[in-house]
Image (cartoon, rainbow, N blue to C red):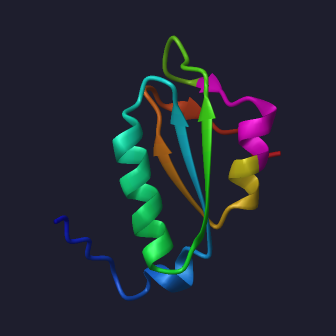
Amino acid sequence: MIEIQMAKTAKMTMENVCILTDIERPESITKVLAIAAQMVGAETAIVTMTSRDMSGVELSHIAAAARRAADAIINQTSFFLHIPRY
């Protein structure tokens, strides 16, 4: 069994969580991250996008919109992504 410990303030800061991932990342890790967020009462959305070829590439408009709607972002992508501030 896996024990997950989170800070007491996690519930206050993570009401709406977006887990941003790509098709190359392990699904098992994405699920554990989602479970951890749900354990503190967060509404959790998993956004899976196609993988990028290198770091610094801008997010798609769909992924950027999900990111803006969230209180907290868990970035589980293969490369660093440029997140525009629209």
Give above or below for 80 relative to 39: above
Return the residue found at the far front. Answer: 1
Give above or below for 1 relative to 83: below
Give above or below for 86 relative to 37: above
Q: In the picture, residue 48 is in which quadrant?
A: top right
Give above or below for 71 relative to 32: below
Residue 58: in magenta span: yes
| Part of the protein shown in magenta | 57-65
Please state the horizontal and vertical placement of residue 19, each as a whole percent of the image.
Answer: 54, 50
Q: Quadrant of the N terminus?
A: bottom left
Residue 7: in magenta span: no
Q: Is residue 77 left or right of residue 16?
A: left
Return the residue found at the far top. Answer: 53
Please state the horizontal and vertical placement of residue 43, each as a whole percent of the image.
Answer: 63, 70
Residue ID at (20%, 71%): 3
Q: Is residue 80 left or right of residue 45?
A: left
Q: How many marks?
A: 0
Q: In the picture, residue 84 is in which quadrant?
A: top right
Q: Is residue 8 left or right of residue 47?
A: left
Residue ID at (43%, 23%): 24
Please state the horizontal and vertical placement of residue 54, each as a whole percent of the image.
Answer: 49, 14
Residue ID at (83%, 45%): 86
Please state the horizontal and vertical placement of residue 27, each as a whole percent of the image.
Answer: 41, 38
Residue ID at (74%, 41%): 64
